[in-house]
Amino acid sequence: MTRFITKFVLVGAVAALAIAMSVAPSDAAKRRAAAKSAACLGPAFCSTNCQGGICAVNLCGTDGKWYPAILTPICLEGLCVNRQKKC
């Protein structure tokens, strides 16, 4: 009787491991998730291209891409928020 219980528990453990391995995300899925997280999350501002004390301001859109800001297209370099080389 104990052999039957031992075999039953062993088969259950192997089945649980197989299910867990098949449900785990693949490396490609992990890379896609990391690439999506690199996109911006709106509403956020970013300042780039600082030349002569004036920087260009970009706004994060709802699709996760950066667009030039319409209402505040420039800012003074000392007052700009989130200064980056590229956004």
Image (tube, rainbow, N blue to C red):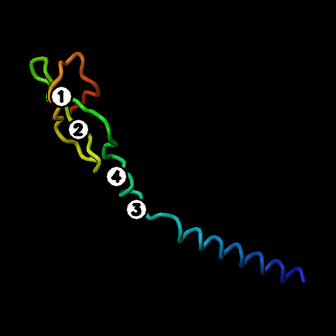
Give, as a three-letter code, the residue at label 2: Cys
Residue that carries the numbered disc 4 in the rendered image: 36
Front tag of 3 and 2: 2
Secondary structure found at label 2: loop
Say if mark 3 contacts mark 4, CB within 8 Å: no
* Disc 1 crowd, CA 10 A, few/some/many (<14, 14-19, 20+): few
The CA span between labels 3 and 1 is 38 Å
Residue that carries the numbered disc 2 in the rendered image: 87
Mark 3 or mark 2: whose residue is earlier in sequence: 3
Residue that carries the numbered disc 1 in the rendered image: 72
Front tag of 3 and 1: 1
The CA span between labels 2 and 4 is 14 Å
Give, as a three-letter code, the residue at label 1: Thr
Placement of 31 over or under 44, stated as above or below: below
- Residue that appears at 44% across and 65% down: 26
Placement of 38 over or under 3, stated as above or below: above
